[in-house]
Image (tube, helix red, strand yellow):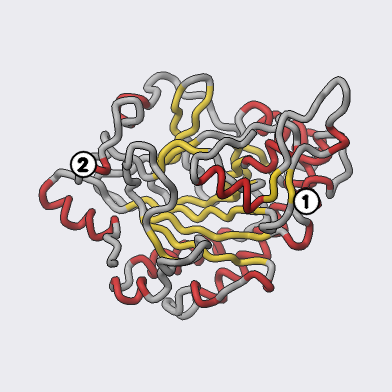
Amino acid sequence: MEVERVQDISSSSLLTEAIPLEFIRSEKEQPAITTFRGPTPAIPVVDLSDPDEESVRRAVVKASEEWGLFQVVNHGIPTELIRRLQDVGRKFFELPSSEKESVAKPEDSKDIEGYGTKLQKDPEGKKAWVDHLFHRIWPPSCVNYRFWPKNPPEYREVNEEYAMHVKKLSETLLGILSEGLGLKRDALREGLGGEMAEYMMKINYYPPCPRPDLALGVPAHTDLSGITLLVPNEVPGLQVFKDDHWFDAEYIPSAVIVHIGDQILRLSNGRYKNVLHRTTVDKEKTRMSWPVFLEPPREKIVGPLPELTGDDNPPKFKPFAFKDYSYRKLNKLPLD
């Protein structure tokens, strides 16, 4: 069965200035109605080059407790490498459909790797205005090059180089977050599987949409991951839910946006917040983003770290193997 890609729907919709009904969100979700229009609080920005390590730790911990999201600058990933990552990703999505379909997610696959469109069940049968590409970039034992584009030719080299940098940055941040809980520096990293933790690259491609007031690129969700490290292109779209409002996230060139995901919420026994976020789309421009999800191995059981629970602080979450947690969440099944 041939799947209709949003990129193709966009091309025909721009001619009619209308979008198919399944992309029109209910009024409680429509961005034109639900986006906060007053003064927007600034999402925390942390400069990782600050020599005052205690100040950096306080800023990361405060942002993770209050927002579940922050942006890092001077993070060690070369600006030129981010530019190259975005360049090869954009070139892939500009290829003819037949080339993109060569790395499509197989219909019968239980995994999410590959080029695709629909990701999870929507209770109202609504669709998101996005196509995507998923593939693991680390550890080498988990990498399946079948889902890595052959074109452009430099795609593999750029992604392998990016994997090294993103792994280093994630371990720095997990160390800071562990110390913020009063634990040894590798506590959260080990809680996510240590050297066996998996790094999943996703490219989101949000083509122009004639009715950005009615559609969403990705509906409201928290990430399944431990943490997510994301670089966007220059077209705004990320929104964060805080204090009962949807706020636009400011675009900072070359910054990395850090999302606290469900597994860090659970390991920290609720001390760190998993951020509820969504993506809006643009009428004239294509938005793209490159999140890397740091996830436990499928069989890894994740629950509150024992050092953080006791008689006065009982576990708030039931431990689950990551594969079971993911299945339950994606299929809207109970998690308690």
Q: Residue at x 73, y 41 (%)?
A: 319
Q: Is residue 333 above or below residue 33?
A: below
Left or right, residue 84 beside residue 326: left
Q: Are marks 1 and 2 in contact (CB under 8 Å)?
A: no
User: Residue 199, located in which quarter of the rendered image?
Assistant: bottom right
Q: Amino acid at mark 1?
A: Arg
Q: Which mark is residue 21?
A: 2
The quadrant of the rendering that contains the N terminus is: bottom left
Q: Nearer the viewer, residue 334 or 305?
A: 334
Residue 83 seen by the camera: no
Q: Is residue 235 above or below residue 276?
A: below
Let me know if residue 112 appears in the view.
yes
Task: In the rendered structure, find residue 189 and report the number of the disc placed on it.
Answer: 1
Residue depicted at 37% across the width and 50% down the height: 287
As drawn, 10 above or below 94 = above
Residue 11, image quadrant: bottom left
Q: Position of residue 218 (x, y in %)?
A: 41, 44
Q: Secondary structure at mark 2?
A: helix
Q: Identify residue type, mark 2.
A: Leu
Provide residue 166's location: percent of width, then percent of height: 65, 58
Does 148 sit above or below residue 22?
A: below
Quick one: label 1 or label 2, which is nearer the N terminus? Answer: 2
Mark 1 or 2, closer to the camera: 2
Q: Position of residue 104 (x, y in %)?
A: 40, 69
What element does badge 1 sit on? helix
Residue at horizontal 53 percent and vertical 62 percent from the top:
111
Q: Give the class, few, some or many, for how many residues have Cα within 10 Å of label 1's Cα (few <14, many ≥20).
A: many
